[in-house]
Amino acid sequence: MSTMDPTAIETRPPADGRTAGKTQAALLVAGSCMPVLGAVLLAPVLPTLNQVFADTAGVAILVPLVLTLPALFVALFSPLAGYVADRMGRKQLLIYAMLAYALFGTAPLWLDSLGAIAFSRVGVGIAEAAIMTCCTTLITDYYSGQQRNKYLGLQTMVSALAATAFFALGGALGSISWRTPFWLYAVSAVLVIPMVLKLWEPAKVAPTTTTKQPVPWRQIGAPAAVTLFGGIVFYALIVHLPYVITGLGVTDTGLIGGAAAIASLATAAGAISFRYLAKLGTRKLLIGAFGLAAVGLCLVSLAGNVPLAIAGAVIASAGTGVLLPTLLTWAVNGLDFAQRGRGTGIWTGTLFIGQFLTPIVLGAVAAGLGNLSLALGALGMACALALVAILVRGPRLVTISQ
């Protein structure tokens, strides 16, 4: 077993000797919340959109696409965003993407056609692909060792908390008008100002250098494949826990939202613990994360009452909170600077493919097995199989650099 850990590789210092601190981390973590905003903000107004555009042909398909199209295009365009980031620079692409996000995100404020609104969401997804790829790549560029572990965990933690806040905020703004939540997309245009002033390119790499260094698929292939499955596991309860709680006879939207909030807090707790658990190494963290997810999902599947379902969701969510930063660290640590944007883009793409596939896969399994609870139990068993596979052929890294 090799004792070398690629996280021990330090990033190259910026040409002017600047050192990134909390300000840069805060901006990059805030930028990483933009895809979360796009994913959950509009969920509460979907029924209203159905009513407003009831006369539109294909409304039953177009309205859900308003919510899910960005995730699909994040998945499709993240690898390309990584390639562009390696060629033209991380900061430059991030600034353009933040401005495009504000433009396409607020477009439904003035659009009157459901088809045009759905098309604008394609632009949101492409912008999100670049934002997520650039923010994550810059975190791995700016920081190394324990600091990198800290901020990658913080990125997942803040995103989990933001999902809960954005869902509640979307509902509150949606009660004013179905268009009102779209104003929040303008926050990226405000955030871009300190990004211009406080962020920088971490190194200058000539285009000829990047073209001679292809992405090492042998290194990133396994993390990307596990991340595709991990994305389905991560989003399973985010998407389906409200249906589980409803299936147990609960009609109080406050209680349903409270259950989702508790699960989000568990995800946040798992993510922030990554900073302290990183010393255990990638292999042990993956085993622990998939183990918790397996136990939690099976418990949710078997739950006959709300407290037991919430307990299962907390266990599973704590596991997935650790899972995401572990997978990202495994994927990108050890990549050369000139490869890191593309590597991060590939990882982001596979994660969002998992997000997009979550309702499709679980819906198909639920149809085959008879109900959603059994489908979640089957996913829990799949997590147990993933745990066994990692035990047999998992990454052989001993520690994550401190």
Image (cartoon, helix red, strand yellow):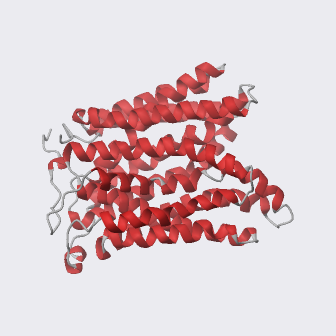
Examine the rendered structure and indicate whether residue 34 appears above or below residue 372.
below
User: Which residue lies at the image location 29% right of the left edge and 42% below the top edge?
Assistant: 150
User: Which residue lies at the image location 78% right of the left edge and 61% below the top edge?
Assistant: 59
* Residue 290 horizontal side relative to residue 375, left or right: left
* Residue 175 horizontal side relative to residue 19, left or right: right
Examine the rendered structure and indicate whether residue 189 appears above or below residue 211.
above
User: Which residue lies at the image location 46% right of the left edge and 35% below the top edge?
Assistant: 267
Q: Nearer the viewer, residue 303 or 87?
A: 87
State the image coordinates of residue 332 (x, y, percent, origin top left). Answer: 28, 54
Picture quadrant where residue 198 is located: bottom left
Q: Nearer the viewer, residue 106 or 207?
A: 106
Task: Give the total number of marks visible in the rendering.
Answer: 0
State the image coordinates of residue 325 (x, y, percent, origin top left). Answer: 35, 44
Residue 332 visible in the shown view: yes
Picture quadrant where residue 388 is located: top left
Q: Residue furthest bottom?
A: 208
Q: Nearer the viewer, residue 130 or 346?
A: 130
Residue 345 visible in the shown view: no
State the image coordinates of residue 369 (x, y, percent, origin top left). Answer: 66, 35
Quadrant in which the N terminus appears: top left
Quadrant in which the C terminus appears: top left
State the image coordinates of residue 158 (x, y, percent, origin top left). Answer: 43, 44
